[in-house]
């Protein structure tokens, strides 16, 4: 089954789709190893890994390259965070063709202006006009060649302070425009906003949430509330920052790596994540074939 079909079916299935954020092929492999259903090629993670703000500083091509590296490293589907679509409708069409051809299973675009600002940063959270964004969703659907390729419409009404009615109004129009799923975002400390949305939303699309600021909710509770997907958007990145910072400080303080040696991944582990065994097997076969061909030459 194609990865786009796998993602589509998962989002529409009865169990919640658990999606882990990644910023690199390596972090995506760790998420796959941990049993997540899909990967979120997070704009925040990808830009933070380059020590840049999540504010459309990176070009579409740079985001695509990072997402494609991620998709190439795992067997599970990858949903790419495509911010507000990188510009106008022409950019959205180019984006869809590019992401689809590089092995992504789907994209998510959010109803904010270009350039966007990360949803948790104060200021510049203005919403895109509803008609303009809905028309981009339709353009995205029309531009894909794989009919299973997933287009997620992300609603930023709560982030912009526009309230439940506006979120529901947008959900209905984006659904009519052809969105395959909705993502309702919130920066509240509890799940109350997204629960209110889920309870009031009458449509048929799976709804995805990103519980960054309400980490106390469990996947089970979200399933019971009828959500189709949950994205853990940045915890892997944050874990790597804390772990690296602690280890580097210890090494700097000790003037030795001895104390951290037992706490960090072994080189054997690193080699396994790099598929070194496969390379060695390939090299062995190459050596055998080289000998065979040399003998008959
Ligand atoms: C991301 O991971 O880049 C997201 C989620 O879009 S958030 O950071 O919450 O906006
Ligand atoms: Mg993002």
Image (tube, helix red, strand yellow):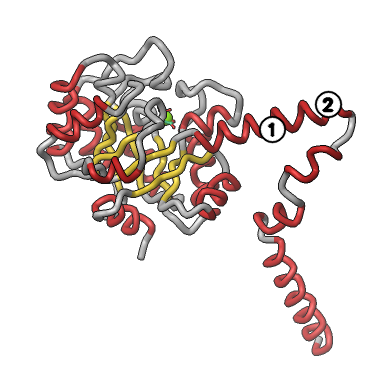
- Does residue 76 lie above or below 117 as drawn? below
- The answer to whether any part of residue 142 appears in the image is no
18, 276: nearer the viewer: 18
| Mark identifier at residue 252 | 2
Find residue 171 and report its horizontal and vertical position in percent.
Answer: 17, 32
- Does residue 211 lie above or below 148 as drawn? above
Crowding at mark 1 (Cα within 10 Å: few <14, some 14-19, many 20+): few
Residue reaching furthest to the left:
202
192, 203: nearer the viewer: 192
Q: How many marks?
A: 2
| Side (left or right) of 205 relative to 50 | left
297, 29: nearer the viewer: 29
- Residue 253 placement: quadrant: top right
Residue ID for mark 1: 244
| Side (left or right) of 245 relative to 15 | right
247, 259: nearer the viewer: 259
- The answer to whether any part of residue 278 appears in the image is yes
Q: Quadrant of the C terminus?
A: bottom right
Name the residue located 78 percent from the left edge and 81 percent from the top edge.
288
Name the residue located 41 percent from the left edge and 19 percent from the top edge.
120
């Amino acid at each position: 089954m194609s990865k786009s079909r796998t993602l589509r079916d998962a989002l529409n299935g009865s169990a919640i789709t658990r999606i882990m954020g990644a910023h690199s092929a390596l972090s995506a492999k760790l998420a796959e190893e941990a049993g997540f259903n899909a990967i979120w090629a997070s704009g925040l993670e990808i830009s933070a890994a380059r020590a840049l703000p999540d504010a459309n500083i990176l070009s579409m091509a740079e985001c695509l390259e990072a997402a494609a590296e991620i998709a190439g490293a795992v067997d599970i589907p990858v949903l790419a965070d495509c911010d507000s679509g990188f510009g106008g409708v022409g950019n959205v069409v180019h984006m869809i063709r590019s992401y689809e051809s590089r092995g992504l299973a789907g994209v998510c675009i959010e109803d904010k202006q270009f350039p966007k600002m990360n949803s948790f940063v104060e200021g510049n959270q203005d919403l895109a006009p509803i008609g303009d964004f809905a028309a981009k969703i339709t353009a995205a659907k029309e531009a894909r060649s794989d009919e299973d390729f997933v287009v997620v419409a992300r609603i930023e009404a709560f982030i912009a302070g526009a309230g439940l009615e506006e979120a529901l109004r947008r959900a209905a129009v984006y659904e009519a425009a052809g969105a395959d799923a909705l993502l309702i975002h919130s920066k509240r400390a509890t799940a109350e906003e997204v629960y209110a949305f889920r309870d009031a939303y009458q449509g048929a699309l799976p709804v995805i949430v990103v519980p960054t600021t309400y980490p106390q909710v469990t996947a089970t509770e979200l399933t019971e509330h009828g959500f189709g997907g949950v994205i853990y958007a940045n915890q892997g990145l944050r874990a790597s920052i804390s772990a690296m910072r602690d280890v580097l400080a210890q090494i700097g303080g000790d003037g030795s790596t001895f104390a951290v040696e037992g706490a960090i991944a072994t080189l054997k582990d690193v080699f396994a994540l790099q598929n070194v065994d496969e390379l060695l097997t390939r090299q062995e076969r190459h050596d055998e074939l080289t000998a065979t061909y040399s003998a008959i030459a």
